[in-house]
Image (cartoon, coloured by chain):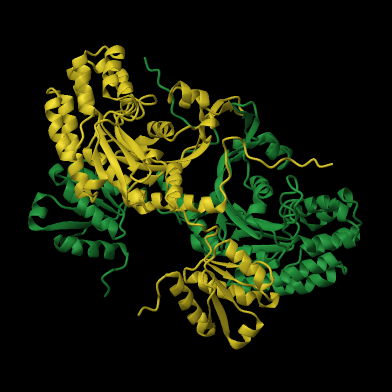
Chain colours: A yellow, B green
Amino acid sequence: MDDRILPRTLKGFRDYLPQAMLVREQIMDTARRVFRSFGFSPIDTPALEYLEILLGKGGAETDKQLYRFQDHGGRDVGMRFDLTVPLARFAAQHIGELGTPFKRYHIATVWRGENTQAGRYREFMQCDFDTIGTRSTAADAETVLVAHELLRSIGFERFTIHVNNRMVLNGLLASLGLAERTTEILRAIDKLAKIGPDRVVEEMTQTAGASHEQASRVVQLVRLTGGNEAILAQLRPLLGNSPLGEEGLERLTELLSAVRAGGVPDHRIKLDVSIARGLDYYTGTVLETILDEVPDIGSVCSGGRYDNLAELYTKQQLPGIGASLGLDRLLAAMEKLGMLPETQTPAQVLLAYFDPARLGDYFQLAGALRAAGVCVEVFPEPAKLGKQLQYADRKKLRLAVIAGEREFAAGECQVKDLSTGESLTVSLADGAAELLQTVKQILGLGDANGP
Amino acid sequence: MDDRILPRTLKGFRDYLPQAMLVREQIMDTARRVFRSFGFSPIDTPALEYLEILLGKGGAETDKQLYRFQDHGGRDVGMRFDLTVPLARFAAQHIGELGTPFKRYHIATVWRGENTQAGRYREFMQCDFDTIGTRSTAADAETVLVAHELLRSIGFERFTIHVNNRMVLNGLLASLGLAERTTEILRAIDKLAKIGPDRVVEEMTQTAGASHEQASRVVQLVRLTGGNEAILAQLRPLLGNSPLGEEGLERLTELLSAVRAGGVPDHRIKLDVSIARGLDYYTGTVLETILDEVPDIGSVCSGGRYDNLAELYTKQQLPGIGASLGLDRLLAAMEKLGMLPETQTPAQVLLAYFDPARLGDYFQLAGALRAAGVCVEVFPEPAKLGKQLQYADRKKLRLAVIAGEREFAAGECQVKDLSTGESLTVSLADGAAELLQTVKQILGLGDANGP
């Protein structure tokens, strides 16, 4: 009788094996380094929140997807479904102590009981950064710089950051007397690529009560194309002297100039009047980042400016801007583009292990290599060389260092390049100086002894 | 009417503000670096598991503390309460693909509905590493080396790793015919420090059916003190020719010799026959790590060898050894020992911002400093210098770089040391070379231009 429990993960959940996890850690490490270099600080919040904190914040669909239950004290609790609602709660609670401006990043897991048939997962990592407590365009421009530096540091060269300012469209709508119908107008605009301009105009006249002329002006505005300067020049006469629209235009101009000065090349930044990013939340700058080679994956870094982050929890008004790096989309893109390494271990060198009486010697060699910055795995059992090399091969290690009784007696060891199969004999004298130098040279780790 | 929601965290849960989170990230970064240098690979598993995977694995108390509920599909699920049960499930599921030996680390959050009156939290981070699929003492010795390197890399110098091998005591108990009463014997031994040897002997005679002489031999064994060599020498005659005990002794001897060769100084490793670490789970080497200056905090890195990790989920036998770094205990110790930095931001330099028309210049300067490895925060609003310096002071930044219209016109800027209040005027010519050199020098970042 076998009463074993079937080892399995829940639907929509997944294990990360080393090969996948190594890449995820590398991206998260890179993101942390970039965030810190701009002065963003890390925070963390609980996975579980009072249900009332989470309910109604992401709409009816999100409420339905919430993982919720009663805890041991009979409290209604839920698992966070994003990092923005926890940030709002966190800011309301701590901003007095932290002061403004407050710049934070937050890399953490969130949960949503999504329909898995759509290929969605129910547990995923979010990677957010926000600057709270300022309306300054400098913060908006910096958000674009961070997005640019994130993508570049992760290894992408061909990508475009699309920027817009919600004030532009909102200004036009206000001047047309359509401000109250923004939601319907945006919903129609979202269909532009799918159904074309004529049917979008038609929909606006039907759902938003716009005249044909008004709808055409809106569609004309969001369809502007060309270089950033050309679009800016065309926008002004279309805005109907709306002060809000003018301010949006001014902020866009300032933003584009600042991000250019900040090192973003012109071909990577595109003024795109059609992007709005959701219906109600954003009020100023919005951004999306598209990978030029795999645009279908969607935006890999998106965000925007909001007027008041934490109004549900505090009287204090907290404007800000933030964006989110799409870790899973980036990984999907890297896989498609062949950017994923095949390594299954961080180890670079296998130190073969033959003689239990020599374990101390192996540990000494491994310690010397680690002190030189090399990641070394000592095979844990005194097995045949073939088995150990097979292991190293399967794990895609780069080098094997081999020393048996004969080598130790001669004061030397073999360094075997596992990709070419070539072997070198090097001396173990002087604290294995030649070994360290050889290994570092092959691994491209630089030579501490200098030329 | 104020219908705002009270911003608060659940009892037993906490927010991490930047000051606390920066230290946590630093420790986790260090741990990852150490794990990788020994060839351990990262994995991750879901926060939620099928309830049947988790139930009954940690005893009745753990079952009671489980966060459990029905998910949207009516499945009984639970939040993981440790990383060992998920590892066992993971290994049963994937070891065929991964092969053995398999070395993994896992740094992740776990949840337990603990009694918070005991000062315990209900959400905390675990930081585990294991070597699976080998019985070799080399893996045990390496586990001690990793524990040693973790503590040293985090910044501790005064600590002691206590090691033992469960085979020693188990061998003695077998030779005394008390093997079946191991649980009761261990329970009595655990009280040694509290109630003294005489009452422990008494308890063993009452609860474990041991004779007075048998109980005395057990107590004599676990009370051995002295240097490691001395204890080893005293142990042998006490073991009553038990083959299991002999093997334990041999493995301990091999372990101590290997970790010495691996660079652990003798004063940091202590053979301690009294440690057992739990009643049933461990079968060979066990270890605990005590900080010499704050022993009351308890072990900050503990673990041991087990015979069969995943027997509940698979027929395949998976022996291994693992240990866990106690992140929260380490932080408590660092706080007590004054090892925690006061910084609230990773930024080292505040770049003051005065003139919106100059935002591009500030971004250029900031970009140049970042490219030189400096973490720079540009103040997001063109505010008065006093306000910006106050901000830098509150966040404990090290330097401020100050350039207004007058400085830009003269092609220079001020570098202000915020700890001393001293200012230097440096040139902005040649891509701000003098600025970069000055800032890097003050921050101790090394000088790329050489001496």
Looking at the image, is A309 positioned above or below residue B138?
above
Residue drawn at x 22%, y 22% as measured from the top left: A218
Instruction: Please state which of residues B346 and A272 is positioned toward the viewer in this rendering.
Output: A272
Is residue A401 visible to us here? yes
Name the spot of residue B26 as percent of width and height, x first: 45, 54
Looking at the image, is A132 positioned above or below residue B171?
above
Residue drawn at x 14%, y 32% as measured from the top left: A234
Instruction: Please state which of residues A176 and B388 is positioned toward the viewer in this rendering.
Output: A176
Residue drawn at x 61%, y 77% as measured from the top left: A361
Name the spot of residue A386 as percent of width and height, x first: 65, 71
* Quadrant assignment for the C terminus of chain B: bottom left
Q: Is residue A376 left or right of residue B288?
A: left
* Quadrant assignment for the N terminus of chain B: top left
Is residue A52 visible to us here? no
Q: Where on the picture, by quarter, is residue B409?
A: bottom left
Q: Is residue A112 left or right of residue A204?
A: right
Name the spot of residue B110 as percent of width and height, x first: 58, 42
Name the spot of residue A270 as percent of width and height, x first: 24, 40
Looking at the image, is B303 positioned above or below residue A71?
below
Q: Where on the picture, by quarter, is residue B307?
A: bottom right
Count of number-bearing discs: 0
Instruction: Please state which of residues A161 and B84 is positioned toward the viewer in this rendering.
Output: A161
Instruction: Please state which of residues A29 and B195 is positioned toward the viewer in this rendering.
Output: A29
Looking at the image, is B392 positioned above or below residue A182?
below
Q: Is residue B116 left or right of residue B219?
A: left
